[in-house]
Image (cartoon, helix red, strand yellow):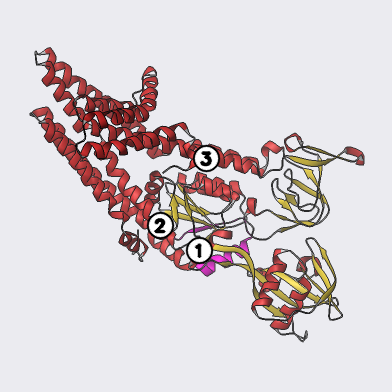
Amino acid sequence: MFTSTYVRLPEARWALAALLLFLLALPTHLLGAPAWLWGPLYAATYVCGGWEPGWEGLKALREKTLDVDLLMVVAALGAAAIGQVLDGALLIVIFATSGALEAIATHRTAESVRGLLDLAPATATRLRPGGDGEETVPADRLAIGDTLLIRPGERIGADGLVLSGESEADQATITGEPLPAAKAPGDEVFAGTVNGTGALRVRVTRDPADSVIARIVKMVEDASRTKAPTQLFIEKIEQRYSWAMVTATLALFLIPLALGAALDATLLRAMTFMIVASPCAVVLATMPPLLSAIANAGRHGVLAKSAVVMERLAQVDAVALDKTGTLTEGTPRVTALRPLPGSGLDEDALLALAAAAEHPSEHPLARAITAAARERGLVLADATAFSSAPGTGVTATVKGQEIRVGAPARLLPDDDPTELEKEGHTVVVVLRDGDPVGYLGLADRPRPGAAATVAALTAHTGRPPVLLTGDNAPAARRLADEVGITEVRAGLLPQDKAAAVREWESAGRKVLLVGDGVNDAPALAAAHTGVAMGRAGSDLALETADAVVVRDELATLPAVLHLARRARRLVIQNLVIAGTFIAVLVTWDLVGHLPLPLGVAGHEGSTVLVGLNGLRLLRESAWRRAAAPQEGP
């Protein structure tokens, strides 16, 4: 239940101890062992699981707030007072475990934010005014107007503008772009992104405390502190229920005593009321269906981090999807070959020429081009006199000819954009002895089953998913057309994605956001429910998200949404069953004489019934039904 990392949390240690003691006491009790054997184990269960909620409840009383956890401790002690030790111990274990899970969730959120801060470098190289050398300074001491030297492979220390130099920056963690972005004088760079093969001089334009990465941290923290409307509603109900239960129990005890009733009989009736009014069945009405759904989803590659997450998944009525690494595989591939008329080249010859020149390069586009040539079984000629210009391309001599491969905007600045560029491809041009001989189009490929997943999500929510991406509009629209998405928002920074999610949430939608990068973390935290892709996902996305698709199988998304809705229906069934039992037993105790054994039997019977009903979702057939095509929301 708890990993070694989380067992160090006090709440987790006490809950684990209470659970183990209860599991030791239960079989000895049920098998008829003497009380001196199981009694101390139950007593230790009460102490381990109940002292902390009891103490916190007493402190809340000082603030004139009645905590339902304190009432559960009192109910457990009341059950023990009239001999129902097992009932009380079970109640203690349930609430201790709940408190531990809440503490773990808080801990994980804090850890995720600390992990994000690690993306920004601790130091930066600042150039002294007047060209008087350089100095290494803490990144948090940088000021607007400082000039930084960014060497190849270094993380950029602050948000700023390039003053001189050309390179490329891997800024997927901020914008979600799958390919490094070319950087030249006048271009913007972001703190925490990684410089490529060229050196840059950058003027700081934002205070480190206001950088994009720092704002991401703040948004995650703010969203984590925000209470959901459901949580606020539960807190209101908790207070009303608590005071009503205390008032009713005291009335049942004090009023008959004042009228001359016997102490033992009055106490027995009040404790019977405490037992039958105890929300054990209500607690189990909710947890088994949700936990069963979590376990079943986990077996099929979807990790939901809590029962609350599964409940939220059941409420989803709108879906927003990231592009790179979520709907796509996250790596560029050659998707089009366009030899120019008169070049004397066919597609294979054009690809072989480009791959031979690119073979010594480590750039992601170069790797994609050489991989495409290998897939076609092409033989590559040897390249000599290789050189690489960051942000521009490569030059090499192949079979005595000078071959240049790179960005058309840099190699052919007067040319109009090609059709491939307009269609959303990343385009490179191939020049032979200075003359263009063809173009290669590269794109990030959709994941297998992306179109089917989009269709299933559309059927589930009644509206097509929306594509949110930091990538350029043509590339985003091209992918959207391939997978069946109609609404696209492209060129978004992290705060823009979060703002879009909040816009839909404020309109009353329950948004499911699916992403994989650090740039998705604020939107994941702001969404009603956030889901991260596990294999490609950044650490922060995985920690911030409410659920993780461990195997990156998109088809599991609609399946887990349908499973969550089935769990919610079972929760409603169980609440009706539990509520009916409690109402009948409490009414019987109030207007008649409910024998204690019958009250306990009814209470425990309802608990077992709702528990077994909830466990139905553990079966494999439950997942198969959820994964089957659905007709609509």
What residue did someone put label 2 on? 299
Which residue occupies 67% across, 38% down? 210
Q: Secondary structure at mark 3?
A: helix
Q: Is residue 306 above or below residue 364?
A: above
The crowding category of the residue bearing disc 2, from other C-alpha atoms within 10 Å (few below 14, some 14 to 19, many at least 20), is few
- Classify residue 181 as left or right of residue 414: left
Label 2: state its secondary structure. helix
> As drawn, is 312 to the left or to the right of 77?
right
Q: Earlier in the sequence, mark 2 or mark 1?
A: 2
- The relative height of residue 372 versus residue 332 in the rendered view (above or below) is below
In this view, the mark in front (3 or 2):
2
Query: Closer to the camera, 286 or 419?
Result: 286
Residue to which mark 1 is pinned: 486
Answer left or right for 16 relative to 487.
left
In contact (CB < 8 Å): disc 1 and disc 3: no
Q: Quadrant of residue 33?
A: top left
Which span of residues is magenta-colored? 464-483
Q: Label 2, label 1: how many angstroms apart (C-alpha)?
A: 33 Å
> Residue 394: percent from the left, percent from the top?
80, 68
| Image position of 240 (left or right of 229) | left
Q: Indicate the amino acid at tag 1.
A: Thr
Pointer 3 or 2: first along the chain? 3
Give the residue drawn at x 38%, y 17%: 62
According to the picture, the residue beneath numbered tag 3 turns out to be 109
Q: Quadrant of residue 45?
A: top left
Q: Amino acid at mark 2?
A: Arg
**Residue at (53% x, 62% y) in the render:** 327
**Tally of numbered discs:** 3
Q: Tell me the CA gap for discs 3 and 2.
A: 24 Å
Q: Position of residue 492 (x, y in %)?
A: 61, 53
For residue 484, above or below residue 248: below
- Residue 297 spot, x, y in % from top left: 39, 55
